[in-house]
Image (cartoon, rainbow, N blue to C red):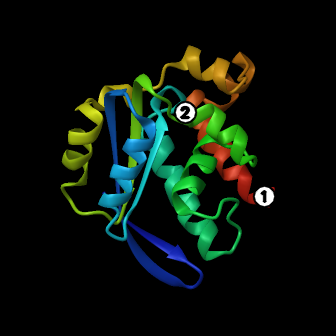
Amino acid sequence: MVEIIQTSNKTQEFNIQIAGFKSKIEDYKNLINELAKLNNGCIIQLMNAEGIAGRKHVANAAIHAIKSFSRNENIANSLGLEICVRTSGQRQISQALKMLGITSGNINICAVAIDCEDNIMQTLADLLGERDDAVLEPDENKLKELYNITEIEADAAGNVTNLLIERTALLITET
């Protein structure tokens, strides 16, 4: 999806791609090295899909991350890490990584690519394994536990996805 975003009095266009993968990561450091080789000026961020409340949640966080850099209100030094921070709704990078970081072993991954080539998700499938966007579907019980969400909070927001999007937006007011 191409997002046209207003940033600091100018309009910019960003190509944001989001996909899910069922992965088995045997060598995390090797994976990071392979991702670095792919980086043709594009941003690739991998997150644990267990902490994702759907494509809308991640897209919203990516847009907030992009805007945070244009306003010089970013929390992290890189856009990829800022996407992780914004998705988690946390100000602490270490807490965001604890919630959404990936590890070796069997793991469902949410991949976010900003301004990459159109075939980047196929390239990532070669590295990560089977593409399966179903892993991005929110598991409300897991999300409530991970994000310490009460039933009252989820009901007030309409659902867990809406609440997590609200938490992402609230990071702006905490800067």
| Label whose residue precedes the other's in the sequence (1 or 2) | 2
Q: Is 39 above or below relative to 19?
A: below
| Left or right: 57 as drawn, with respect to 120 | right
Q: Secondary structure at mark 1?
A: helix
Residue at horizontal 51 percent and vertical 75 percent from the top? 6
Q: How far across and down, in percent of the image, does residue 157 sit?
A: 65, 32
Q: Secondary structure at mark 2?
A: helix
Which residue position holds label 1? 173
Query: Closest to the observer: 20 or 156?
Result: 20
Mark 1 and mark 2: Cα distance apart in space: 20 Å
Residue 161 numbered mark, or none: 2
Q: How far across and down, in percent of the image, does residue 68 sit?
A: 63, 66
Q: How far across and down, in percent of the image, does residue 56 sit?
A: 45, 43
| Residue 163 visible in the snapshot | no
Residue at horizontal 58 percent and vertical 59 percent from the top? 64
The quarter of the rendered structure image containing the C terminus is bottom right
Query: Closest to the observer: 157 or 87?
Result: 87
Badge 1: few (under 14), some or many (20 or more) residues near its Cα, within 10 Å?
Answer: few
Badge 2: few (under 14), some or many (20 or more) residues near its Cα, within 10 Å?
Answer: many
- Residue that sits furthest to the right in the current view: 174
Q: Is 153 above or below relative to 12?
A: above
Residue 113 numbered mark, or none: none
| Left or right: 73 as drawn, with respect to 161 | right
